[in-house]
C-alpha cells in the first residue's frame, strides 16, 4: 500500500493510470444516453489496494458486477452513447452526492475500507477532482451538446445489484428506479412485466432520492430529461452469455419505448 501519497492531490492519478471516463458511440443520435456510474473497479496506483484483499475488491462492494458487459453490448445494439466510469466505487462513489458519508465509504456492507479511514479533506478532494468531477462534467457536456443540437435525450442509468445483501436473498431479476419522471419508468415497467419469465421491481431494490443518488437527480431530473435507472441482478449477468442475453432483451424493449415516445411526439 502507498496510501500516504494519495494525500497529494497531484499524485492521485499518475501517467500509468487510465482516465476515469470510458465512452462508446460518442456522437450517436440515438435518444438514449446510457450511463454507468459503477462500471469499473480499478484503484488508482497511488491508493494501492485500499487495505483490502483481492477477494473484497472483486465483490459487489467494489463495482456493479456484470454491468460493463451489458452496457457495452446495449450501447452497440442501440447505437447509443455510453458514458461510464472506470474507477471503483470504493475510491469514490459516482452516484452519491460528494457531501454524503457514503461518497467515500468507510464501510461497505460489512467490510471496513482501511484506505478510506481518516482521509484528509485534501485527499477526499483529490478523488472528487480527478474521478467524480470529470465523469459528471462529461455527462453534462454531452447533454448540453445534445440540447443545443436538438437531439432528444432519454437518460438511462445502468446498475446491477447483489443477489444477497446482508444475508437476505433478493428474488427480483430486474428493477426500475425513478423519482420525479413519471413517464419513462411506467413504460419500461409495463414492457418488463410482459416478459413472463421476469420478477420485476418497481423502485426496488432501491429507489432514487436526492440524498442517495446523483446521476438521475442531477443529469436527468434537474435537466428536465426523461430518465430511469435500471438495476439487474448480478448473478444473471455474471458471464458474457448472460450479459448478451440481457443486452438483447433491453435493446428490444428500449427500441419499443423509442417507437412509443416518437408516436406520442415526446421525443
Ligand atoms: Zn450501481
Image (spheres, rainbow, N blue to C red):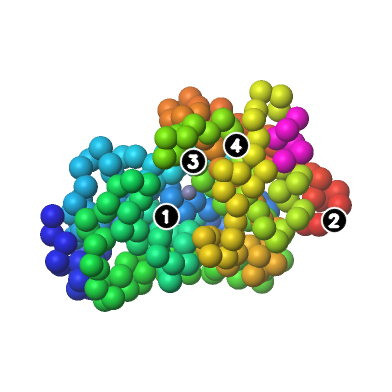
State yes or no: discs 3 and 4 in contact (Cβ < 8 Å): no
Can residue 168 be seen here? yes
Considering only order in the chain, which callout, 4 or 3, is on the residue closer to the N terminus? Answer: 3
Q: CA distance from mark 2 to mark 3?
A: 34 Å
Numbered disc 3: secondary structure: strand
Residue 10: x percent and y percent? 23, 73
Single out the residue that lies furthest toward the front.
167
Residue nearer the viewer, 175 or 13: 175
User: What's the residue at 47%, 35% (across, down)?
Assistant: 168
Q: CA distance from mark 4 to mark 2?
A: 28 Å
Residue 131: x percent and y percent? 36, 64
Single out the residue that lies furthest toward the bottom.
122
Considering only order in the chain, which callout, 4 or 1, is on the residue closer to the N terminus? Answer: 1
Task: Please give the residue where the numbered disc 4 appears in the rendered image.
Answer: 174
Task: Please give the residue where the numbered disc 3 appears in the rendered image.
Answer: 161
Numbered circle sitting on residue 265: 2
Quadrant housing the N terminus: bottom left
Quadrant housing the C terminus: bottom right
* Residue density around tag 1, few if under 14, some if 14–19, many if 20 or more, within 10 Å: many
Numbered circle sitting on residue 128: none
Question: Which residues lie in the magenta part?
Answer: 189-194
User: What's the residue at 35%, 50% (across, down)?
Assistant: 108
Left or right: where 3 falls relative to 141: left
Task: Please give the residue where the numbered disc 1 appears in the rendered image.
Answer: 85
Ligand 1 closer than 8 Å to label 3 CB: yes
Numbered disc 2: secondary structure: loop
Amino acid at each position: 500500500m502507498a496510501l500516504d501519497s494519495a494525500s497529494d492531490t497531484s499524485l492521485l492519478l499518475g501517467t500509468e493510470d487510465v482516465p476515469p471516463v470510458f465512452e462508446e458511440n460518442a456522437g450517436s443520435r440515438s435518444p438514449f444516453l446510457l450511463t454507468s456510474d459503477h462500471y469499473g473497479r480499478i484503484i488508482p496506483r497511488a491508493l494501492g489496494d485500499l487495505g483490502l484483499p483481492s477477494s473484497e475488491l472483486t465483490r459487489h462492494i467494489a463495482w456493479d458486477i456484470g454491468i460493463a458487459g451489458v452496457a457495452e453490448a446495449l450501447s452497440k445494439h442501440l447505437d447509443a452513447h455510453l458514458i461510464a466510469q472506470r474507477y471503483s466505487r470504493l475510491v469514490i462513489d459516482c452516484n452519491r452526492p460528494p457531501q454524503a458519508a457514503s461518497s467515500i465509504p468507510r464501510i461497505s456492507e460489512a467490510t471496513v475500507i482501511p484506505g478510506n479511514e481518516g482521509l484528509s479533506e485534501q485527499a477526499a478532494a483529490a478523488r472528487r477532482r480527478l474521478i467524480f468531477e470529470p465523469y459528471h462534467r462529461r455527462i453534462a457536456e454531452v447533454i448540453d451538446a445534445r440540447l443545443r443540437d436538438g437531439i432528444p435525450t432519454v437518460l438511462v442509468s445502468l446498475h446491477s445489484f447483489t443477489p444477497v445483501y446482508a444475508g437476505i436473498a433478493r428474488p427480483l431479476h430486474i428493477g426500475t428506479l425513478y423519482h420525479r419522471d413519471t413517464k419513462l419508468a411506467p413504460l419500461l415497467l409495463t414492457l418488463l412485466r410482459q416478459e413472463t419469465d421476469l420478477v420485476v421491481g418497481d423502485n426496488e431494490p432501491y429507489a432514487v432520492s436526492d440524498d442517495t443518488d446523483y446521476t438521475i437527480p442531477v443529469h436527468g431530473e434537474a435537466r428536465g430529461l426523461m430518465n430511469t435507472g435500471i438495476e439487474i441482478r448480478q448473478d444473471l449477468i455474471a458471464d458474457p452469455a448472460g450479459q448478451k442475453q440481457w443486452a438483447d432483451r433491453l435493446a428490444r424493449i428500449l427500441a419499443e419505448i423509442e417507437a412509443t415516445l416518437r408516436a406520442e411526439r415526446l421525443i
